[in-house]
Image: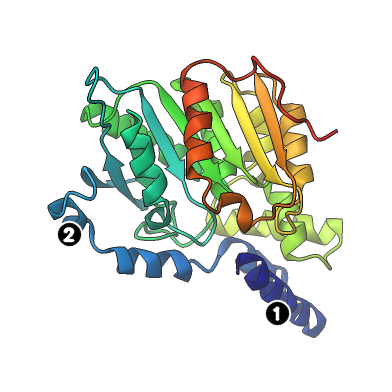
Amino acid sequence: MKDITRTLIGMILLSAFLTGCTTTQYAMMLIKQDTTQGKVKEEIVGLSDQLLKSKRISAARVYTMPDGVKIDVWVYKHKSPDSGKSRGTVLVLHDIGNSKADYRVLAKKLAEKGFDVVLPDLRAHGRSTGKYVTFGAKEKHDQKYVIDQLLKEKLISLPIFAFGFDLGGAVAIQYAAIDPRVKGVIAVAPNRDIFSFCRRLLPLLNEADAMKVIEKAGKIAKFDPADASAIMAATKLKCPIILMHGQLDMTVPVTDSKMIYESAVSKKELNILPMTNHITIMFLREDDIVKSIERLADGKVGLKTGKSGK
């Protein structure tokens, strides 16, 4: 469904291109993403107070960022019947247009394995506020602030591990690069940077015009586009990284993960999944993701060679 939706969006944008759009209009297309899907899922799942009352989540918080954006967060506490001690915390970041509500199954499975789990809505998504998507430039700092506050409240435990899909994957890598408390990151089908996203969203723009659109987007949303790059973040990682990507992904091409993999200087693995696209890569893969996070927690990433796809 997501690939079909983006194809339709591409057709609309093509029509807009043929009829003529200004740089500002293109910039707004880039940073003003449709997040209806995620908001609807949150309404279906219910309000935080309802989830707390029914004990479907352990805690709910809303944190105000320095720029006034409010980030809505759910927390799942670990369930460790043997030792009673948490194995650490997993920050789970959703894909573009979606919300934290879609990752509750993964959160529950991680909690059952002894991890505390943090589920935030990215800015401009779900029940978080904010107008614009900044592709990690601001989102990574939001995550650090959220983790800071939850640690202060002693709601979660160190070490921190970051997981994300699509936009969430790119943000997870960027966040891990600025927070030394992160001891491992898993990114599924991440965009490599804002430029690659823009060129896919607006394929008929030449490179010079795309750069103008990106520059304008940065001015509107008040961020530096150069600061929204998973590739650059990978060069600064101090922790292991696992990259997963579908071989048949037409939404975010596998070359994005390959380029991030080549840029990473820490222990790394790249797993390219055959006969898998952007939709099917997350379908019923919660157990595989949990096992990968357990490998990160046990320090086993990099001890075997991941598929480089070369």
Q: The residue under label 1 is which amino acid type? A: Ile
Residue at 37% x, 59% y is: 129
Residue 153: give x, y in percent of width and height: 21, 30
Q: Is residue 192 left or right of residue 53?
A: right
Q: Quadrant of residue 143?
A: top left
Q: Is residue 265 visible?
A: yes
Farthest residue toward the left?
Answer: 53
Q: Secondary structure at mark 2?
A: helix
Residue at 22% x, 56% y is: 48
Give the residue number, with chain letter if any, for mark 1: 12
Task: Determine whether label 1 and label 2 are within 8 Å by CB.
Answer: no
Farthest residue toward the bottom?
Answer: 19
Q: Is residue 176 left or right of residue 204?
A: left
Asked if 107 appears above or below 217 in the picture, the reply is above
Identify which residue, 296 or 263, lies in the foreground: 296
Quarter of the image where the C terminus is located: top right
Q: Is residue 281 left or right of residue 50?
A: right
Question: Pointer 1: residues within 10 angstroms few (<14), some, or many (20+)?
Answer: few
Q: Is residue 137 visible?
A: no
Q: Is residue 284 left or right of residue 144?
A: right
Q: The residue under label 2 is which amino acid type? A: Gln
Residue 157: give x, y in percent of width and height: 30, 24
Give the residue number, with chain letter if any, for mark 2: 50
Residue 217: give x, y in percent of width and height: 63, 58
Quarter of the image where the N terminus is located: bottom right
